[in-house]
């Protein structure tokens, strides 16, 4: 009460009330106790179902016993008998153990218990009746991990595999509800006295009320409690004026779908948290709870059908509120455009099917930045409201709003709110409610805020005490009004009153956790690869379906694979901030996508061109090649022919057969000089590499325009010390830049591997340290405008960051980075704190630095971290954090990037298409015949428009969805032409619902589509 010490009287009063409150009264919370009849247990390393567990042999157990180790499960059988003389009393089973427990009664989960989540008792009865069962058998399923896993020492340290868990206390107790109520009264009054401050009269009134209560109340005589409680109630019923701020309180329980514990444990975390919520709802009819992540609901639906039915009941009553609209709370930066769409498509379809309605708000409280394309994708999925709070974590700049309109790169706008308490896991304290108002930057424009309460991250959720606190703060003079509310009620009020709100345009960039663009490179690479695999399976299966209506489009299998991919995009998995167990789980899921995806590709190809494929073991004469991208490609492919010769082939859009070998107008030539340097040239570009693999010159042959500044080296590997303050896997701090060291130890000097013709290549190796080595093959193909760097790294570092730099002879204040279905600019200078806070940013397949008429693009096949400072473009390659996974990124890596100098703008130069080509290699298959004519399924007339996705519409066999977007940032009209038997074309939203006025006239050239910058358009194509 330091800030209240205006006089000794006040200080004395406060001390007196405090001593009475906590030392005397809290000892009376529990009355009589009674031991259990018996306790026995059974341990298992597996997470097994209840039915299986109760069949096992249970051995006697006792309080004080230790069990474990980490990740095991200890099942306890509890026999209890409630004393008859406790009639009329509230009786709890008190369970105080390490680990997270689920109480099972009559084969059903009934209560989650965790000490860290302030839940240690299961209420057996509110008031013991003669007719109540007095003898009970319960089971306790105790997971050997805490709410936050089992970190050794600190929370984010790698898990301690040998942790032991102890049962500290278990007994039956009489719970004195009246004492609990008085304790909450005192807490709120004292907190008001403390946090309202000495300038506020209400703080004194609160303190003097508490003092009067102490005077009235004899701790040893419960008959004096009601009068004291009455005094508090009188104080709490002194109302606010009309102008007071309203806080919309909503129960919440942030459950990371995997993080410091594996996916499997998250399933149980959901059950433990939500069964607790259901118990609270039974006792608190006004209690509302928001629940995001369709995947978690699907888990509970499958594993806990009884609990799920209760959840659906409370959802019908409007108390249990599904929110968010996505499959999981995904990373907000790295998933590609189509993945983002599928997060919403899978999520919204689940919510519609299971709860009868679509979510109207996107809910992503906890991820590491938000793509500027999200507003359009939300809008396309029936969502126009957005809630998060993570930007409060920004290290450098304070975001200027809590309630505002957020506008994306295409101009779509959504209403956004950041709960001003800067938390999604409040506990209903006075201090939090005051912070919510005081911290609110838009409180002059709107008079409403959200407060999300309930233990989170590892689950847990709300408690009765939190609810009891907020009940008292409903409308108390001096405090904001705290009302149970729903997202819809809250946003509806904003929509009514929000005419003066500001608009923020572009990305919501988190100035923290920038290491998450790079950490766990294998997860990121697999994500990119699996996005491609599912794209290709969908394109080819759609074509097979269009060709033969009997083709069994693998809708169910694709749904499973998509859901695995979407799950791995969870905001602690794709960012690489998870423990080793989770990284392993993720790789298993990716492996399933690869294996099943390959099989599905084969089936589609077999259906499409089975006649051409070799039937026996005879050597195939020709090659069939398929292009899943919607434009012509001219590329060199390696054919597995006895001669081993490469072939240059030209392709048509989408799919084509019988490659036409072309004679290259200008073959590649690799020429070595006496000093060991090598020149590679293909008539389009010419590169000069020194013996260390540096690109000392890279110029356009036609114009002679050089891209490497005089005296600089491109393709310069650099290594940094990378020691964040705390969040190891998450953060790369700005000060790492001060430790830049070029990698200069040569292991194998540059040598020519392929001297030229259709393909030329050179190779070299560099030593990073005693334990790490880079080997790179630099490849130039005939007619190709970019130089490709196929890179192998043996990486065994600790707290190091490897990047590659490309200084560029081009000057611009801004660089361009690809994002979902588009791109955006970020500054290349550090003028202001907002500029330098973006010293490390994210990008998808390409980034570009251009001045008028000329520029250089860097393409990549699996990297996301990047930066451009001044005229140096850097691609972030590998990190070596040790928490929460000591093994993160250790071992072998392979990745490719490419550099493409170009005339004109990157749009004119086709950078976007080349980046697609680098990421979507052609499919080649041996074939018997070359007599098949080339066939092209789709053609888009405007080079600005990308046909990104072709798939079967959900639940509508015989209808395809084609999704296109404008990629240049321009207003264009284009034709989408197809030779598929389309009888009807209708535009639709991202949930594939036809636009009522969306019928497109089919003309000879196909259908005509008009785009505004970065607009995404989906078209339903009804096959004839
Ligand atoms: Zn989280």
Image (cartoon, grey):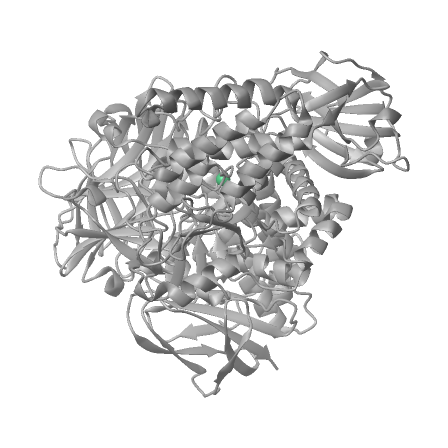
The quarter of the image holding the C terminus is bottom right
Left-right relation of 576 to 258: left
- Asked if 622 appears above or below 997 in the picture, the reply is above
Q: How many marks are shown on the rendered structure?
A: 0
- The residue lying toward the viewer, choosing from 62 and 171, is 171
Q: Position of residue 139 (x, y in %)?
A: 80, 29
Q: Position of residue 974 (x, y in %)?
A: 36, 78
Left or right relative to 398: residue 921: right
| Residue 818: quadrant of the picture | bottom left
Residue at the spot 51% in from the left edge and 39% down from the top edge? 428
Residue furthest toward the left? 710
Residue 739, percent across and down? Answer: 22, 25
Residue 613 appearing in the image: no
Taking 347 as reference, is 764 left or right?
left
The image shows residue 228 at horizontal and vertical percentages of: 58, 32
Asked whether 320 or 998 is in front, the reply is 320
Residue 208, placed above or below residue 995? above
Which image quadrant: the N terminus?
top left
Left or right: 522 as drawn, with respect to 7: right
Residue 450 versus residue 842: which sits nearer the camera? 450
Q: Nearer the viewer, residue 853 or 622?
A: 853
Residue at 16% across / 46% down in the picture?
808
Residue 799 visible? The answer is yes
Residue drawn at (42%, 65%) of the image: 495
Picture residue at 84% right of the left edge, 35% below the top: 51
Task: Kindly indicate the quadrant of the structure image that contains residue 541.
Answer: bottom right
């Amino acid at each position: 009460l330091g800030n209240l010490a205006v006089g000794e009287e006040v200080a004395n009063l406060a001390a007196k009330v405090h001593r009475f409150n906590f030392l005397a009264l809290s000892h009376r919370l529990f009355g009589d106790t009674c031991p259990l009849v018996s306790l026995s247990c059974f341990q298992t390393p597996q997470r097994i179902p209840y039915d299986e567990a109760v069949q096992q042999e249970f051995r006697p157990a006792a309080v004080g016993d230790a069990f474990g180790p980490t990740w095991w499960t200890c099942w306890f059988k509890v026999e209890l008998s409630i004393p008859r003389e406790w009639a009329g009393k509230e009786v709890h089973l008190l369970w105080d153990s390490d680990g997270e427990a689920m109480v099972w009664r009559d084969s059903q989960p009934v209560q989650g218990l965790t000490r860290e989540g302030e839940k240690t008792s299961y209420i057996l009865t509110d008031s013991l009746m003669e007719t109540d069962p007095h003898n009970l058998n319960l089971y306790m399923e105790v997971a050997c991990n805490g709410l936050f896993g089992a970190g050794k020492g600190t929370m984010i340290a790698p898990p301690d595999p040998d942790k032991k868990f102890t049962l500290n206390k278990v007994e039956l107790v009489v719970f004195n509800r009246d004492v609990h109520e008085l304790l909450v009264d005192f807490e709120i009054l004292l907190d008001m006295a403390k946090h309202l401050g000495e300038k506020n009269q209400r703080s004194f009134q609160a303190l003097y009320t508490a003092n009067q209560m102490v005077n009235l109340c004899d701790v040893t005589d419960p008959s004096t409690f009601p009068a004291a409680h009455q005094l508090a109630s009188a104080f709490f019923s002194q109302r606010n004026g009309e102008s007071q701020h309203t806080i919309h309180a909503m129960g919440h329980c942030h459950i990371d779908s995997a993080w410091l514990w594996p996916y499997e444990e998250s399933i149980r975390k959901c059950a433990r948290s939500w069964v607790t919520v259901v118990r609270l709802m039974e006792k608190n009819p006004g209690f509302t709870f928001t629940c995001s992540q369709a995947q978690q609901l699907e888990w509970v639906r499958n594993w806990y059908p009884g609990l799920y039915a209760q959840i659906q009941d409370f959802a019908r009553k409007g108390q249990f509120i599904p929110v968010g609209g996505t499959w999981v709370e995904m990373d907000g930066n790295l998933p590609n455009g189509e993945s983002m769409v599928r997060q919403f498509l899978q999520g919204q379809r689940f919510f519609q099917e299971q709860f009868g309605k679509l979510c109207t708000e996107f809910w992503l409280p906890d991820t590491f930045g938000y793509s500027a394309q999200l507003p359009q994708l939300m809008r396309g999925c029936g969502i126009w409201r957005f809630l998060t709070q993570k930007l409060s974590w920004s290290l450098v700049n304070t975001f200027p709003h809590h309630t505002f309109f957020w506008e994306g790169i295409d101009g779509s706008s959504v209403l956004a709110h950041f709960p001003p308490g800067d938390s999604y896991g409040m506990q209903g304290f006075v201090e939090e409610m005051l912070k919510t108002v005081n911290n609110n930057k838009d409180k002059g424009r709107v008079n409403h805020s959200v407060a999300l309460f309930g233990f989170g991250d590892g689950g847990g959720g709300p408690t009765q005490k939190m609810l009891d606190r907020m009940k008292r703060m409903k409308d108390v003079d001096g405090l904001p009004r705290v009302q149970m509310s729903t997202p819809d009620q809250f946003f509806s009020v904003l929509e009514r009153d929000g005419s003066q709100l500001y608009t923020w345009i572009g990305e919501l960039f988190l100035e923290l956790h920038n290491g998450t663009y790079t950490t766990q490179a294998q997860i990121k690479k697999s994500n990119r690869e699996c996005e491609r695999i599912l794209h290709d399976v969908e394109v080819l299966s759609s074509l097979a379906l269009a060709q033969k209506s009997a083709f069994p489009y693998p809708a169910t299998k694709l749904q499973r694979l998509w859901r695995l991919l979407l799950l791995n995009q969870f905001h602690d998995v794709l960012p690489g901030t998870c423990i080793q167990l989770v990284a392993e789980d993720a790789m298993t899921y990716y492996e399933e996508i690869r294996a099943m995806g390959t099989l599905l590709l084969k089936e589609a190809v077999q259906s499409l061109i089975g006649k051409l494929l070799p039937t026996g073991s005879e050597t195939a004469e020709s090659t069939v090649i398929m292009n899943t991208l919607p434009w012509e490609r001219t590329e060199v492919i390696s054919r597995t022919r006895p001669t081993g010769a490469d072939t240059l082939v030209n392709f048509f859009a989408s799919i084509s057969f019988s490659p036409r070998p072309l004679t290259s107008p200008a073959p590649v030539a690799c020429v070595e000089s006496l000093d060991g340097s090598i020149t590679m040239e293909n008539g389009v570009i010419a590169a000069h590499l020194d013996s260390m693999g540096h690109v000392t010159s890279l110029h356009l042959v036609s114009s002679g325009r050089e891209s490497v500044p005089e005296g600089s080296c491109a393709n310069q590997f650099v290594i940094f010390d990378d020691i964040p303050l705390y969040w190891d896997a998450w953060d790369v701090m700005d000060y790492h830049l001060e430790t830049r060291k070029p990698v200069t130890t040569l292991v194998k000097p540059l040598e020519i591997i392929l001297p030229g013709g259709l393909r030329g290549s050179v190779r070299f190796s560099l030593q990073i340290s005693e334990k790490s080595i880079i080997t790179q093959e630099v490849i130039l193909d005939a007619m190709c405008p970019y130089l490709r760097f196929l890179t192998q790294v043996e990486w065994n570092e600790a707290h190091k960051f490897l990047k590659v730099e490309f200084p560029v002879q081009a000057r611009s204040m801004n660089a361009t980075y690809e994002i979902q279905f588009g791109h955006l600019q970020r500054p290349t200078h550090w003028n202001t704190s907002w500029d330098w806070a973006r010293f490390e940013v994210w990008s998808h397949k390409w980034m570009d630095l251009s001045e008028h008429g000329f520029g250089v693009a860097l393409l990549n096949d699996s990297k996301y971290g990047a930066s451009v400072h001044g005229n140096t473009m850097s691609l972030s390659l590998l990190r070596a954090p040790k928490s929460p996974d000591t093994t993160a990124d250790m071992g072998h890596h392979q990745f490719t990037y490419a550099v493409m100098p170009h005339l004109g703008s990157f749009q004119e130069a086709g950078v976007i298409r080349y980046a697609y080509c680098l990421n979507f290699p052609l499919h080649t298959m041996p074939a018997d015949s070359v007599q098949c004519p080339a066939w092209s399924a789709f053609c888009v007339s405007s080079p600005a428009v990308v046909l990104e996705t072709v798939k079967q519409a959900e639940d509508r066999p015989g209808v395809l969805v084609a999704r296109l977007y404008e990629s240049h940032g321009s207003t264009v009209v284009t034709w989408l032409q197809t030779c598929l038997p389309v009888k009807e074309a209708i535009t639709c939203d991202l949930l594939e619902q036809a636009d009522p006025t969306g019928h497109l006239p089919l003309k000879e050239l196909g259908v005509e589509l008009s785009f505004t910058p970065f607009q995404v358009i989906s078209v339903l194509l009804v096959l004839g």
